């Protein structure tokens, strides 16, 4: 659920709005009836961004952790990757 708050009202009651955000609510800040900003809980912010990417069809995610990736860069012989970068 989103709570609407004018800039003036937010200034006067910031502490109360922050308590609501801590409780999981989102506060939409308006100026002259137009939304100009949004205060969201930190965890919800990440979840909202992931949900937006998923809705846009840019990602498919089941909510679980990703498996660790194997290293991509490999060298043959005693030369390390750091040695190769230093030579460049």
Image: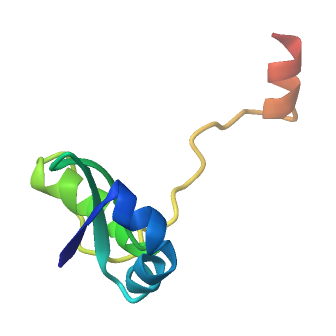
Q: Residue at x 34, y 77 (%)?
A: 64
**For residue 10, what is the image quadrant?**
bottom left
> Quick check: can you spot residue 58?
yes
Q: Residue at x 88, y 26 (%)?
A: 83
The colour scheme applied to this rendered structure is rainbow
Marks counted in the figure total 0
- Is residue 50 or residue 25 the one in the foreground? 25
- Is residue 9 or residue 78 the one in the foreground? 9
**For residue 54, what is the image quadrant?**
bottom left
**For residue 22, what is the image quadrant?**
bottom left
Residue 32 location in percent, x, y?
20, 45
Q: Residue at x 36, y 72 (%)?
A: 44
- Is residue 75 or residue 72 the one in the foreground? 72
- Is residue 37 or residue 75 the one in the foreground? 37
Residue 30 location in percent, x, y?
25, 53
Q: Which quarter of the image is occupied by the N terminus?
A: bottom left
Q: Which quarter of the image is occupied by the C terminus?
A: top right
Residue 61 location in percent, x, y?
24, 65
> Quick check: can you spot residue 46?
no
Task: Name, please, the residue furthest toward the top.
Answer: 88
Question: Above or below — where is 39 with respect to 86?
Answer: below
Task: Name, please, the residue furthest toward the bottom.
Answer: 23
Q: Does residue 67 appear to the left or right of 3 in the view shown?
A: right
């Amino acid at each position: 659920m989103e709570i609407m708050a004018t800039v003036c009202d937010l200034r006067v009651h910031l502490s109360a709005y922050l308590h609501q955000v801590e409780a999981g609510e989102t506060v939409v800040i308006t100026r002259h009836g137009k939304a100009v900003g949004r205060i969201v809980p930190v965890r919800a912010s990440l979840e909202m961004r992931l949900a937006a990417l998923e809705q846009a069809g840019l990602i498919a995610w089941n909510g679980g952790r990703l498996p660790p990736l194997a290293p991509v860069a490999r060298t043959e012989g005693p030369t390390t990757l750091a040695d190769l970068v230093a030579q460049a």
